[in-house]
Image (cartoon, rainbow, N blue to C red):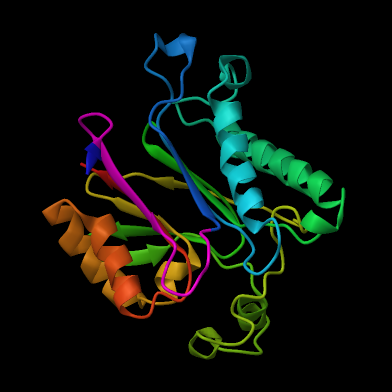
Amino acid sequence: MKAINRAIRYCTRTDQGLKRSRNEDAYLVIENIPDPRYGGSGTGPLFAVADGMSGHTGGGAASRMAVEGLRKYYMNPVNIQGAISISGREENLRELEKVVLGIHEEISELAERGERYEYMGTTLSVLLLAGKKAYVAHVGDSRIYRLREGHLEQLTHDDTMAQLSVEMGYLDAEEATGHPMSHTLVQALGQGVDELQRKKVEINPGDVFLLCSDGLYDMVPDHEIQELLHQGVNGGRPCDLLVEAALENGGRDNVTVIVVRVL
């Protein structure tokens, strides 16, 4: 795993999978967001995973637009000054939402220009670490997990018809797993966003965060993800273990993972 500083390490890996003709996933790591107010120390690292809508022309373009939109915004000192604070202000969530919705508008505008990109769209899951807080912004069915004291918790919920049916009481969680509607998105960047998921959580020493596309959790059940994360962070190669497990179990989709360890 690569060290950002004495407290945070991370790894990344993406793979086309065994059944897809191209990789429409994209990911982003910004190790330190520049901010002159903090003497060059910045406001903390940002991580993101995007999964272009499979089967639609422009899915790969949409996922790249999502992560590059984040990069352009957060690497621009003019934008970041006064927006993100390492002190953990509530404005961090509003700023993340503002940026993601702006990217949604850009993708939507391109989708309206012609038939080639008519159905382009992407998921986006963003994790920002600022001080002792982790900020999450999310749309779609990529996921962010947290492993804490051996327990794996999903911090995002899937924007799918199956998950909506669970919330409305038509399906239980077990029925939703593998359901035909489990990847029918009810919202995605470029195709419609009613409400962006956003969340702030405390960071504890020893926390491990996982960002991933559905190519991981479709192939590897949560209990195995938990075991591989625990094994991998101790051995230094959790991303390799997770992706290799997805491929060994069939690799039906593109798979992308980012693992972040707080020492």
User: Is residue 89 found left or right of 148 in the rendered image?
Assistant: right
User: Does residue 202 lie above or below 39 as drawn?
Assistant: below
Image quarter for residue 262?
A: top left
State which region is magenta.
3-23
* Residue 22 is inside the magenta segment: yes
How many numbered marks are there? 0
Depth check: 7 or 105 in front?
A: 105
User: Does residue 16 lie above or below 9 as drawn?
Assistant: below
Let me know if residue 158 appears in the view.
Answer: yes
User: Is residue 126 found left or right of 237 in the rendered image?
Assistant: right
The quadrant in which the N terminus is found is: top left
Let me know if residue 49 appears in the view.
Answer: no
User: What residue is drawn where x is 30% and y is 69%?
Assistant: 225
**Percent x, y for residue 124?**
58, 52
User: What residue is drawn where x is 80% and y is 46%?
Assistant: 110
**Percent x, y for residue 137?**
57, 48
**Percent x, y for residue 177?**
50, 84
